[in-house]
Image (spheres, rainbow, N blue to C red):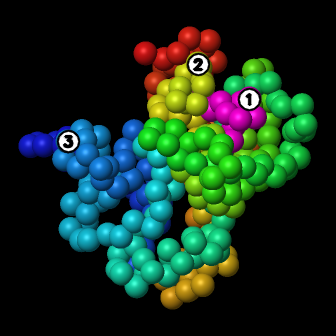
Amino acid sequence: MVTGMEKPNLGPFVYESRRVIVIDKPCGWLSVPSRQGEEDARLCVGRVLEAQLGTRLWPVHRLDAEVSGLLLFAKDADAHRLLCAGFEHQQVRKTYLAWSAGPLPDQHRVRVTERWQSLLLRGKKRAYVHRAGKEAVTMATPLAVEGHRILWQLCPKTGRPHQLRVELFLHGCPILGDSLYGSTLPWPCGVALRAFELNLTDLEGRQELSLPPKISLLSDGQDYLSGGRAWKSALASSSGRSTHSACPAP
């Protein structure tokens, strides 16, 4: 819990307008307060941002605490309504990158996209396949195989809890650092899953909200492959911890 002299700030912001703010959520932070409320000691993006900006914010979507990347908040109720409708009707296309253990599943080929579909049910801690679950659809593209590691581009068509983490586990490629779904291999911070891009081209009301067609964590000239490699290298350098060790991080 953040108290006293501790005043964490988030920034620089990836994008900000009068009605919308997009941040790069750090791993380990909650998107919104958990059910434990004040008893949960983890930092919360929504609360910190509201204190930092001195205004109320409306969360539009969420990322697991272990996951980093693009997270969008509305600054007014009408913007929140428009954005939530866009997410619900799949007008916002999300792209994630993930590093997983190998080997590459037999039916997959590098740079060839496959459609993953399953019925997922959310349990107390984990999601799992169940005939009473909700349909989960993911477009999955292995971008590179580097030793015993695979870089994936993942585009979820639905937004089920833990969807991408479960799907990679089901395909025998658990995300690095994701011990909840079978990984025994380390990642310097959280799990190796990052929300890299929001494509807003088809979002109704986009111009009204002064949003660009695309918001991305890729630098100019980067593609997903180079962006994924740069992400891994930057984390390894900042932590001093190898992402190729066979031993779990402490």
Tell me the element at label 3.
Answer: helix
Disc on res. 172: 1
Instruction: Decide which of tag 2 and tag 1 comes sooner along the chain.
Output: 1
Mark 1 crowdedness (10 Å alpha carbons): few <14, some 14-19, many ≥20 = some
**Residue 87, visible in the rendered structure:** yes
Stretch of the chain drawn in magenta: 167-177
The percent position of residue 110, horizontal first and vertical second, equals 87, 39
Tell me the element at label 2.
Answer: loop
Image: 77 above or below 160: below
Image: 189 above or below 6: above
Mark 2 in CB contact with mark 3 (< 8 angstroms): no
Q: Residue at x 62, y 75 (%)?
A: 89
The percent position of residue 220, horizontal first and vertical second, equals 66, 56
- Spatial CA span between label 3 and label 1: 36 Å
Outermost residue, top direction? 247
Q: Which residue is mark 3?
A: 39
Left or right position of 112 against 158: right
Under mark 1, the amino acid is Gly
Disc on res. 184: 2
Q: Main secondary structure of the magenta part?
A: loop
Under mark 2, the amino acid is Thr
Left or right position of 247 against 62: right
Q: In which quadrant of the rendered view does residue 170 lie?
A: top right
Image: 207 above or below 220: below
Mark 3 crowdedness (10 Å alpha carbons): few <14, some 14-19, many ≥20 = few
Q: Quadrant of the C terminus?
A: top left
- Spatial CA span between label 2 and label 1: 13 Å
Q: Is residue 31 magenta?
A: no
Mark 3 in CB contact with mark 1 (< 8 angstroms): no
- Residue nearer the viewer, 249 or 136: 136
Mark 2 crowdedness (10 Å alpha carbons): few <14, some 14-19, many ≥20 = some
